[in-house]
C-alpha cells in the first residue's frame, strides 16, 4: 500500500449508531414513520450520534423487464412488495431529519445515487454486494456525500483497490467489518477483522455492521473494545400486521444493545493518551510501595548511594520509594537524616540524568557507525566518568568489553574533546589498535599521535593517558582485565565514589 495522505476532518460523526430500516417499513409509509419515531425516541437516551438508513433501488430498471412482477424469486418479490413512492420516501427522510438524526441511504444502482443526492441525505452507504460494483462506485465517487462501505466477503486486493479509488477522489470514506449471514451465528462473527481493517487502513474510520441474533449484546461491546467507532443494526417495530425478521432488533433489544455499547465505552475509558491516575489510585499504590530508609546517619549535602539506604514498608506520604530509585536518578540530602529514618522528598535534592546518559549513548552509537564498527548485540556499555558525570564531556570514555578470559578485547570510544586521565596497570599488558579517528597517546610523559592502523603495546607499569580532539575508536587487546588493576596518578579520581555507569540494552 502507498503512503497515506494526512486525514482531513470527516463529516461522518462518531461514535455513530446506524439504525438500518431497510425494507422493514414493509412498503407501508405509516409503519415506516412509526419505526423512525420509536427509534428516534430511543436515541434521545444515549450520547451516541445516530443515523437512520433506508435503501433505494430504481425497480423499473433494477429488475430485468422479463422478470418484473415475479413472485417466485425471493428478492424480486420482497423488493416489489416493499416499494415506496418518491413522495413516501421523502416523508421518511423528513421525519428522520425532523428528529435531529442523520439520514443515510444505500443505493443499489446509479439512478438511486442521483435520488439520494436530490432528496438531501447526509450519508451514503455501499452494501457489501456492491463494494466492487465499479459503475455504481463511479457514480458514488462523483457525489459530495461521505461514504461508508460494508466489507463482507471482499478480498484484500479488492479492499485495497476500492480504498485507493476513494482516496484518489478525496472521498470522506469509512469501512465496516461485516459478515453476510442473516442472522450470523456467534461462531462466524469474525470480530478480529476489525483489527485487520484498523491496521491496514489506519487513516480510515472502521466500524461494525451486525447481523447476529438481536438478543446478542456481547459482540457490540467487543467491537467497541477493538476500536470500532461506527455501529449498524437492523431494527423494526413488531406489530400484528408485521413481524420482525431473525436479525432485526425490536425496541427493547435495541436498548439492550445500546446499553452494552455504552457500558463498553465507559469501561474502555480514555483513548489515545495515558490516563491520569486518580488521587485514590495514587494513594493505594504509594501504600504498597517500599519506602527508602537511611541505613546510617546521612549528613546534609551528602549524595545517597545504594549502600546508604534500605527499602521497607510502611511508606509515608512524600517519602522517596524504591520506584524512584535508579541509576538515572540521584538523591542528595539537603538536611541530616538519622539512621533508620525515612528519606523524604522534601529533605533531598533529586537530579535526573537519564537524558544525559541517553545523549552519550546516541553519540557513541553514531561514532561507532561512522567507524563502520560492529558491536555484539549482548555487549554491555561501560560509561567511565572519572571525575563524575558533570565532567564526562572533558574527562571520560566509553567501552564495550567483547571478551574477558585469559585474554581480553575491548572496544574503546573517545568522543570529540574527551581525555582519559593518566593511569597504569601492575599486571595487565595491553595493545591499542586504532580503528577510526586520531588519538593522542602519552606514555610515561611522552606524547605520540596514533591514526587508523596504528598499533601500540603498553607494558605493565607504563603510565598512559590519551585524548582525541575529533573522536576516536580503537581496540584494546590485553591479558585478562582485573577490576583492581587500574591505578590513577590523580588521587582525586579515587575520591569519586561512582565513576561508572553500565548499560546492558543500549544498541536498540
Image (spheres, helix red, strand yellow):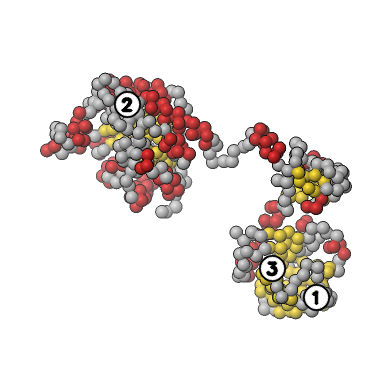
Q: In front here: 265 or 98?
A: 265
- Circle 1 is placed at which residue position? 427
- Nearer to us in this view, 200 or 322: 322
Task: Please state if 340 lies on the left or on the right of 24 as rendered.
Answer: right
- Horizontal placement of 109 versus 450: left or right? left
Question: How far apart are the alpha carbons under marks 3 and 1?
Answer: 18 Å
Which image quadrant is residue 319 in? top right
The spot of residue 347 in percent (x, y) is 82, 41
Helix, strand or loop at mark 1: loop
| Residue displayed at 85% across by 62% down | 494
Secondary structure beneath dot 2 equals loop
Can residue 242 be seen here? The reply is yes
Name the spot of residue 61 as percent of width and height, x first: 18, 37
- Report the residue at 69% width, 68% height from top: 401
Q: Quadrant of the N terminus?
A: bottom left
N-terminal of the two: label 3 or label 1? Answer: 3
Q: Residues within 10 Å of mark 2 (few under 14, many from 20)?
A: many
Q: What residue sits right under mark 2 in the picture? A: 236
Contact flag, marks 3 and 1 (Cβ < 8 Å): no
Residue 439 placement: quadrant: bottom right
**Residue 142 in view:** no
Residue annotated with mark 3: 401
Indicate the quadrant containing the C terminus: top left, top right, bottom left or bottom right: bottom right
Left or right of 262? Residue 410 is right
Residue at left 49%, top 34%? 264
Q: Relative to 95, is 434 above or below?
A: below
Circle 3: element type: strand
Mark 2 or mark 1, earlier in chain: 2
> For this rendering, which residue is in front, 226 or 9?
226
Amino acid at each position: 500500500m502507498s503512503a497515506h495522505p494526512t486525514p482531513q476532518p470527516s463529516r461522518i460523526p462518531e461514535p455513530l449508531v446506524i439504525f438500518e430500516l431497510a425494507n422493514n417499513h414493509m412498503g407501508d409509509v405509516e409503519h415506516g414513520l412509526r419505526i423512525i419515531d420509536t427509534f428516534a425516541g430511543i436515541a434521545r437516551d444515549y450520547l451516541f450520534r445516530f443515523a437512520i438508513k433506508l435503501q433505494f433501488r430504481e425497480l423499473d430498471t433494477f429488475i430485468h423487464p422479463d422478470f418484473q412482477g415475479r413472485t417466485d424469486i425471493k428478492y424480486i418479490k420482497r423488493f416489489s412488495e416493499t416499494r415506496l413512492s418518491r413522495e413516501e420516501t421523502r416523508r421518511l427522510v423528513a421525519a428522520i431529519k425532523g428528529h435531529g438524526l442523520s439520514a443515510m441511504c444505500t443505493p443499489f444502482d446509479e439512478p438511486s445515487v442521483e435520488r439520494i443526492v436530490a432528496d438531501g441525505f447526509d450519508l451514503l452507504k455501499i452494501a457489501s454486494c456492491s463494494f466492487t460494483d465499479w459503475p455504481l462506485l463511479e457514480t458514488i465517487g462523483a457525489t459530495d456525500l461521505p461514504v461508508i462501505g460494508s466489507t463482507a466477503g471482499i478480498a484484500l486486493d479488492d479492499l485495497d483497490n476500492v480504498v485507493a479509488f476513494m482516496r484518489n477522489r478525496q472521498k470522506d470514506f469509512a469501512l465496516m467489518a461485516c459478515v453476510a449471514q442473516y442472522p450470523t451465528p456467534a461462531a462466524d462473527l469474525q470480530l478480529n477483522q476489525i483489527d485487520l481493517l484498523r491496521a491496514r487502513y489506519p487513516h480510515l474510520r472502521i466500524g461494525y455492521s451486525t447481523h447476529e441474533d438481536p438478543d446478542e449484546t456481547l459482540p457490540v461491546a467487543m467491537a467497541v473494545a477493538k476500536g470500532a467507532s461506527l455501529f449498524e443494526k437492523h431494527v423494526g417495530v413488531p406489530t400484528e400486521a408485521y413481524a420482525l425478521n431473525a436479525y432485526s432488533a425490536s425496541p427493547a433489544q435495541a436498548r439492550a444493545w445500546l446499553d452494552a455499547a455504552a457500558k463498553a465505552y465507559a469501561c474502555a475509558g480514555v483513548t489515545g493518551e495515558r490516563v491520569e491516575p486518580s488521587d485514590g489510585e495514587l494513594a493505594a499504590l504509594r501504600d504498597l510501595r517500599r519506602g527508602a530508609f537511611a541505613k546510617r546517619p546521612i549528613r546534609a549535602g551528602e549524595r545517597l548511594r545504594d549502600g546508604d539506604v534500605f527499602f521497607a514498608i510502611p511508606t509515608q506520604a512524600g517519602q522517596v520509594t524504591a520506584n524512584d530509585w535508579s541509576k538515572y536518578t540521584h538523591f542528595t540530602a539537603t538536611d541530616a537524616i538519622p539512621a533508620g529514618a525515612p528519606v523524604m522528598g522534601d529533605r533531598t535534592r533529586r537530579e535526573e540524568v537519564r537524558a544525559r546518559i541517553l545523549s552519550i549513548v546516541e553519540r557513541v552509537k553514531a561514532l561507532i557507525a561512522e567507524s563502520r564498527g560492529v558491536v555484539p548485540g549482548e555487549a554491555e556499555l561501560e560509561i567511565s566518568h572519572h571525575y563524575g558525570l558533570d565532567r564526562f564531556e572533558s574527562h571520560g570514555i566509553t567501552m564495550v568489553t567483547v571478551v574477558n578470559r585469559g585474554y581480553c578485547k575491548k572496544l574503546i570510544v573517545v568522543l570529540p574533546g574527551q581525555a582519559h586521565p593518566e593511569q597504569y596497570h601492575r599486571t595487565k599488558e595491553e595493545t591499542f589498535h586504532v580503528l577510526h579517528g586520531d588519538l593522542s597517546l602519552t606514555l610515561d610523559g611522552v606524547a605520540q599521535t596514533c591514526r587508523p592502523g596504528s598499533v601500540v603495546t603498553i607494558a605493565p607499569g607504563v603510565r598512559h593517558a590519551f585524548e582525541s580532539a575529533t573522536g576516536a575508536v580503537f581496540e584494546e587487546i590485553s591479558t585478562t582485565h582485573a577490576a583492581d588493576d587500574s591505578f590513577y596518578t590523580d588521587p582525586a579520581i579515587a575520591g569519586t565514589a561512582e565513576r561508572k555507569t553500565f548499560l546492558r540494552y543500549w544498541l536498540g
